[in-house]
Image: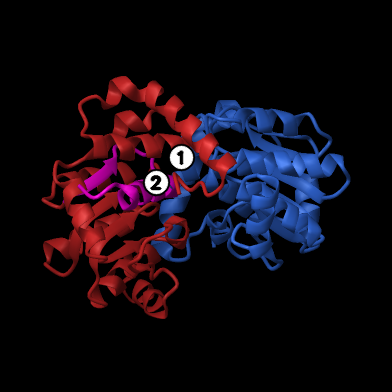
Chain colours: A red, B blue
Amino acid sequence: MFMGASTKQGYEIAEKSREIVRSLIADKTKELSNEERSIVERIVHSTADPEYADITKMSKDFVRASRNSIENKKDILTDINMVKTGINKYPGEVNCYIKDERTVTIAKEYNITRAAAAIRVAAENDFEGIAVVGNAPTALLEILNLFNKGKINVSSVIGVPVGFVGAAESKKALEQTEIPYLVTEGPKGGTPVAVAAVNSLINLKKE
Amino acid sequence: MFMGASTKQGYEIAEKSREIVRSLIADKTKELSNEERSIVERIVHSTADPEYADITKMSKDFVRASRNSIENKKDILTDINMVKTGINKYPGEVNCYIKDERTVTIAKEYNITRAAAAIRVAAENDFEGIAVVGNAPTALLEILNLFNKGKINVSSVIGVPVGFVGAAESKKALEQTEIPYLVTEGPKGGTPVAVAAVNSLINLKKE
């Protein structure tokens, strides 16, 4: 199992792609740890967009905090089901509450997005682990809101929502907290970036 | 329901984002039909990457062929489950055979990727409709291979696999067939692009 490949041909394609990615972004990743470099390479591999080597930023404690959470099989929370679907081979639980009945009710009652309401449902369900936002800035802002109130227990946050409305600002806000984070600065991000970061963390060798 | 939004706040964000996207890429989309422009705008909206307005190409018959398929509720085939998960509100069937037992067997027997084997399984299951490749160039090449042999019945192909190994070439090969197509030329593409194209087609008003 290497970057999603499960056959000889798939493995060879993934390995060749990884070599190309590595050489494309070598200059931009030389300051990173091996683990951080591996995560950035996988993000560029999954988007074919070398700009992600410039805009992907991690706090110093991100890899350690995330790996601890994964080794303890804590839950992973995703903002939308596409991210959940892409997370392979995690022995713990991966949860997404976007289609939960309570989410629909809370969204209507408080006039917030379903993505934000789904985070409240997770917090009420005593979520503890890595939170992954691949789509909705409002989900990321709700995590920060609940964190500031001491109402959500996040090991780390992968904050890579996408879009021209609020995404960049929500990621800047995450960078200013004490939460261990990975973000893609600016409007870019998305589900493949989120999935690449999580699957890379899951596959990292234990240190 | 507008670009995935289902609440007032979500709708407002989506609408504002769409306006920003429209102004960012107006120059690049002026030669397109309203339907084609709508598809390209949604792709840029979902990636926050205006370059997709340069590299997204459709054959002249793509929208009509795809809409016919959708109006007749023909199946939609996806290469991986992330794409399937992202397709909302389609009254017909959306199928993905990547985890099918037959796929695993065929991949081993013929030493091909699971993504390619999954396309063979679909063809054996008498698939007829729109084929959507958001990830694996080998899946797209297998569609072309089966099409040339008269063994797969595609209404149109959304070919947006991503990566530095084979993706650009597979999309160029699709453009040279008589199949109605949408591609993103070069290495870029991915699951959000595929999902944006399909959901945009589903939401287009009947002409």
Residue drawn at point x = 46 percent, y = 40 percent:
A46
Q: Which residue is disc 1 drawn over?
A: A46
Say whether residue A67 is left or right of residue B110: left
Q: Amino acid at mark 2?
A: Ala
Residue drawn at point x = 44 percent, y = 32 percent:
A18
Circle 2 packing at 10 Å, graded few (<14), some (14-19), many (20+), is: many
Asked whether the beta carbons under mark 2 and mark 1 sit within 8 Å of each other, the answer is yes
Residue A63: image location, x then y, percent? 21, 46
How many angstroms separate mark 2 from mark 1 (CA)? 7 Å
Mark identifier at residue A196: 2
State yes or no: residue A199 in magenta: yes
Residue A154: image location, x then y, percent? 19, 61
Q: Amino acid at mark 1?
A: Ser
Q: Which residues are magenta?
A: A180-207
Question: Measured along the vertical axis of the image, is residue A112 above or below residue B185?
Answer: below
- Residue at the extreme right: B150
Residue B70 location, quadrant: bottom right
Answer yes or no: is residue A48 visible.
no
Say whether residue A196 is left or right of residue B152: left
As helix, strand or loop, the secondary structure at mark 2 comes to helix
Say whether residue B73 is left or right of residue A102: right
